[in-house]
Amino acid sequence: MTLIYSGNGLNSNSAPAVREDMEAAVKTIIEGLGEDVEREGLQRTPHRVAKMFTELTAGYRTDPVALINEAIFTVDYNEMVLVRDIEFSSLCEHHMLPFWGKAHVAYIPNGKVIGLSKIPRIVDMFAKRLQVQERLTREIADFVAEAIGASGVAVVVHGAHMCSMIRGVKKANARMVTQSLQGVFKTDPQIRAEFMGHITANYSDE
Ligand SMILES: Nc1nc2c(ncn2[C@@H]2O[C@H](COP(=O)(O)OP(=O)(O)OP(=O)(O)O)[C@@H](O)[C@H]2O)c(=O)[nH]1
Ligand SMILES: [Zn+2]
């Protein structure tokens, strides 16, 4: 299997060492705020922040082949598969502030299905990077499409962006909705309508 998004081969489970130059950069920011970097509460903050950003960008170090772990199965099923309400958090690439929300990922198989848990793992691999919501949405769809050769893929993402909630335009209630519709989801209005119906439905187990 060839995958378009190759990781750098590192295993995302082993936390990488925190770079000292990142800590120094955080220290510079704290000093720029006029704070005393040596006071007790701030002494380890450069280390904590560098470690935090490394954790929040673990997707750069996720190996996509290890993620899928060959969990692609031949199944005689050619109807929609949908995993909805996948919570995610990411960092906006403009401000490095969080954005978070839910992703809904559907596909129509073409002979192959993918392990259920792999869909949220794919969402996380692309969310844990510096992102814009549009690219996140597109990358999830492209990856699923290529991994299983689906007849169609649909991804809808709802996001709340802290950078426009607590600063700047300060619209705490505004939400961004993005979508990537590929294959039959783009060409067949009925399949698209079924998908939209499933992601807006209230199921009794919720
Ligand atoms: N399209 C898109 N824009 C985003 C996303 N996250 C943040 N932004 C926007 O990126 C833009 C950056 O605009 P700039 O004018 O360069 O930055 P700024 O001066 O901080 O802008 P304001 O947020 O308007 O104060 C802002 O409009 C943000 O709302 C995203 O996921 N997608
Ligand atoms: Zn932002």
Image: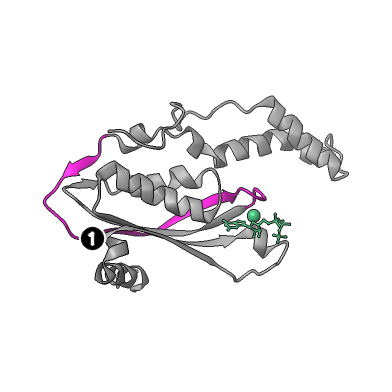
Q: Residue at x 23, y 53 (%)?
A: 151
Quadrant observed for ligand 2 in the rendered image: bottom right
Task: Give coordinates of residue 200: x percent, y percent.
Answer: 37, 72
Residue in front for this viewpoint, 117 or 157 = 157
Q: Which residue is mark 1?
A: 80
Q: Residue at x 31, y 73 (%)?
A: 197
- 123 lies left or right of 91: left
**Which of the 4 image quadrants contains residue 174?**
bottom right
Q: Residue at x 39, y 45 (%)?
A: 122
| Mark 1 closeness class: few <14, some 14–19, many ≥20 residues within 10 Å | some
Name the quarter where the N terminus is drawn: top left
Label 1 SS: loop
Range drawn in magenta: 70-97
Residue 134 visible:
yes
- 7 lies left or right of 45: left
Q: What's the amino acid at mark 1?
A: Met
